[in-house]
Image: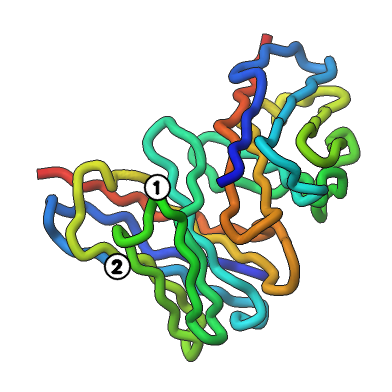
Amino acid sequence: EIVMTQSPATLSVSPGERATLSCRASQSVSSNLAWYQQKPGQAPRLLIYGASTRATGIPARFSGSGSGTEFTLTISSLQSEDFAVYYCQQYNNWLVTFGQGTKLEIK
Amino acid sequence: EVQLVQSGAEVKKPGESLRISCKGSGYSFTSYWISWVRQMPGKGLEWMGRIDPSDSYTNYSPSFQGHVTISADKSISTAYLQWSSLKASDTAMYYCARVDSYGSKPFDYWGQGTLVTVSS
């Protein structure tokens, strides 16, 4: 099983500032990496797939990068609606795994 | 419009059985796998397993193999997650999500979730 490790667990950022979230895989997942956003009481929503491709309707302030074992999600200018929990997920093989999540909170 | 609509919240006692459902619409149900994901209270996302509705082939996470059963009825575009004997530790929100059956793909649409509470 591929273990996904996200850091930090909690990130405090002010609105308008940039947020950088990290995700590391225990072995290479190529570019088969997705990021999801989950707000309280809601289902997760796909933000990024293929490590760097935005899903339909996702604003350009969200960007993803990386390949192999190291990945980054960047939110360029935080809006109030961006404060949520973010999960990375590898889908390189049928046994998909998620990171433990990063909570992005208002500073 | 693609939709995955899950059955409503359930309150059960330990030892009881349960089946929850996930109905797909707005797309070809047999062209996408359905995965099930558990989220325990205040915790992260855990992939449980998946089914190919075209032939009911399944894969399970080792953590859930033998504890749950995933099935599907393609005639009514519905996937199921069932337990034969619930435990208090099964208390969680359960989500279904669809995955393109061709190649390695992410979960692009999710159901709204079904809250299962197991308590004596």
Residue that lies at the very extreme toward the top in this rendered image? A107
Res B1 visible: no
Q: Which residue is mark 1?
A: B93
Horizontal arrangement in the rendering, residue A36 relative to residue B19 (left or right): right
Please state, as top left, top right, bottom left or bottom right, where the C terminus of chain A lies in the image.
Answer: top right
Determine the residue located farthest toward the front in the rendered image: A27
Q: Dot 2 corresponds to which residue?
A: B19
Q: Secondary structure at mark 1?
A: strand
Q: Which sits earlier in the primary sequence, circle 1 or circle 2?
A: 2
Determine whether the residue tagged by mark 2 lies in a helix, strand or loop.
Answer: strand
The residue positioned 50% from the left and 78% from the top of the image is: B57
Q: CA distance from mark 1 to mark 2?
A: 14 Å
Q: Which of the 4 image quarters holds residue A52?
A: top right
Image position of B86 (left or right of A7): left
Q: How many marks?
A: 2
Whether residue B14 appears in this view of the structure is yes
- Residue type at the position of mark 2: Arg
Is residue B92 rendered to the left or right of residue A72?
Answer: left
In the picture as drawn, the residue positioned furthest to the right comes out as: A60
Q: Chain of mark 1?
A: B
Residue A20 vertical placement versus A4 (above, below): above
**Is the C-beta separation of discs 1 and 2 under 8 Å?**
no
Q: Position of residue B10 (x, y in %)?
A: 26, 56
Toward the viewer: A92 or A14? A92
x and y percentages locating residue A12 in the rendered image: 67, 12
Where in the figure is residue B33, as x and y percent of width and height? 59, 71
Residue at image x 87%, y 25%?
A76
Quick one: which residue is furthest to the bottom in this view? B75
Identity, as a three-letter code, of the amino acid under mark 1: Met
The quarter of the displayed image where residue B114 is located: bottom left
